[in-house]
Amino acid sequence: MNINCLRIVTPQPQVKLISLFSTRKSRTLILSLKLSSSVLMSYDKGFAAAKKAASIAARLCQKVQKALLQSDVQSKLDRSPVTVADYGSQALVSFVLERELPSEPFSIVAEEDSKDLRKDGAQDTLQRITDLVNDTLSIDGSYGSITLSTEDVLKAIDSGKSEGGSHGRHWVLDPIDGTKGFVRGDQYAIALALLDEGKVVLGVLACPNLPLASIRSDYQHSADKEVGCLFFAKIGAGTYMQPLNGSSPLKVQVTAIENSEEASFFESYEKAHSMHDLSSSIAKKLGVKAPPVRIDSQVKYGALSRGDGAIYLRFPHKGYREKIWDHAAGCIVVTEAGGVVSDVSGNPLDFSKGKYLDLDTGIIVTNQKLMPALLKAVKESLEEKASPL
Ligand SMILES: Nc1ncnc2c1ncn2[C@@H]1O[C@H](COP(=O)(O)O)[C@@H](OP(=O)(O)O)[C@H]1O
Ligand SMILES: [Mg+2]
Ligand SMILES: [Mg+2]
Ligand SMILES: [Mg+2]
């Protein structure tokens, strides 16, 4: 008897088809289709390191948001804001991942770089970031009495210069997703994912301001709500949520709603990030009654993964190119919770092309039942927009 182990290409690269060939009867008997546990286990160390890195970075961000000074906000060349917390979070995540995974080659595609911090006049800001990083590490206590220099911090930030792609493993980091929300005192997330051969295999979303209880369509700020959620997902293993400062993870699932009239939907708070008129035309076609829930960042993916809302619509204005760090962690958090993330043609997002996502028009997210109706409504609304009566 001759046993062959045949690897087939599927959306989940670790799925193996094991077939048994009988030489006597020359008949193929498919014995089982099962997850290769050794491949899944090989992500375990990275998964633990990612959770730790995002949680530590979240502590730095919480501290800065509480005491946000105007001088802590800089403007990048593209005129988007960046704060000492974006830099500090990126430095911390890189530092923790490298420390926790010393035997693995380290590659990370991250949003920020140190260019502006190396300019004349940026010394005070760099010192402030370095102090924040060191204070956070010292409060955490895992790495003894380590003190990073300003040069160590610049290097840690710049380790995020990888281009990603379809080969090997690459971390993908948005040190603060939703910087505008962060500066406003609203929602933001630390979003970290791992790509393996161009596929997202694990993702962690730290959402320091997201209430632990469902936000549904009545989301509003409330000082007395308990906040701070950590979402995490590994390919083939589901999505979990736990309090940022605690344990006891809960498995989460997207909503099971089948009737689009009962669905509520999320979109960006910032009008410049997504065409709200298009979302409202789609919602109208679907008969959605609830008003849109407008919140910043990949918190939308986290909230959707636990069923707070049923649909997330994102339609950037013409010419904008989506970056992988704005979606990688959120995407696996939703798909492992049973949801679907696609472009307007129904194609899954392709994270294997470097730091940009090449997309057809926009990103839509919902559960499997609602997706066909959503795709139809999106198509019709786009056609009406392209050729108004
Ligand atoms: N004109 C634009 N259209 C779409 N997205 C944009 C944009 N300008 C910035 N963004 C991205 O939108 C992200 C925030 O998403 P959201 O709109 O869901 O809050 C920003 O992440 P950062 O805050 O990390 O820079 C940024 O990458
Ligand atoms: Mg940014
Ligand atoms: Mg972002
Ligand atoms: Mg960011």
Image: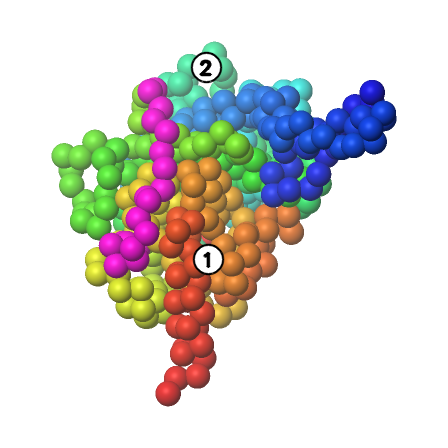
- Within the magenta stretch, is there residue 139? no
Q: Identify which residue, 254 or 5, lies in the foreground.
A: 5
The front one of 214 and 20 is: 20
Label 2, on which residue?
142
Q: Residue at x 29, y 32 (%)?
A: 228
Secondary structure of the residue carrying tag 2 is loop
Labels 2 and 1 touching (C-beta < 8 A): no
Q: Is residue 121 visible?
A: no
- The magenta-colored residue range is 247-265
Question: Element at badge 1?
Answer: strand
Mark toward the start of the polypeptide (2 vs 1)? 2
Tell me if 161 is positioned left or right of 318 in this view: right
The C terminus sits in image quarter: bottom left
Q: Amino acid at mark 1?
A: Ile
Residue sitting nearer the eye, 12 or 326 = 12
Taking 75 as reference, is 10 above or below it? above
Q: Which mark is residue 363?
A: 1
- Residue lying at 56% horizontally and 40% vertically, measured from the top left: 200
Residue at 85 percent of width and 26 percent of height? 23
Q: Position of residue 36 (x, y in %)?
A: 63, 26
Question: Residue 85 at what x, y percent from top left?
Answer: 40, 39
Q: Left or right of 14: which side holds 184?
A: left
Give coordinates of residue 259: x percent, y percent: 29, 55
Residue 331 versus residue 226: which sits nearer the camera? 331
Q: Main secondary structure of the magenta part?
A: loop
Q: Residue at x 49, y 29 (%)?
A: 237
Up-down: is 275 above or below 74? below
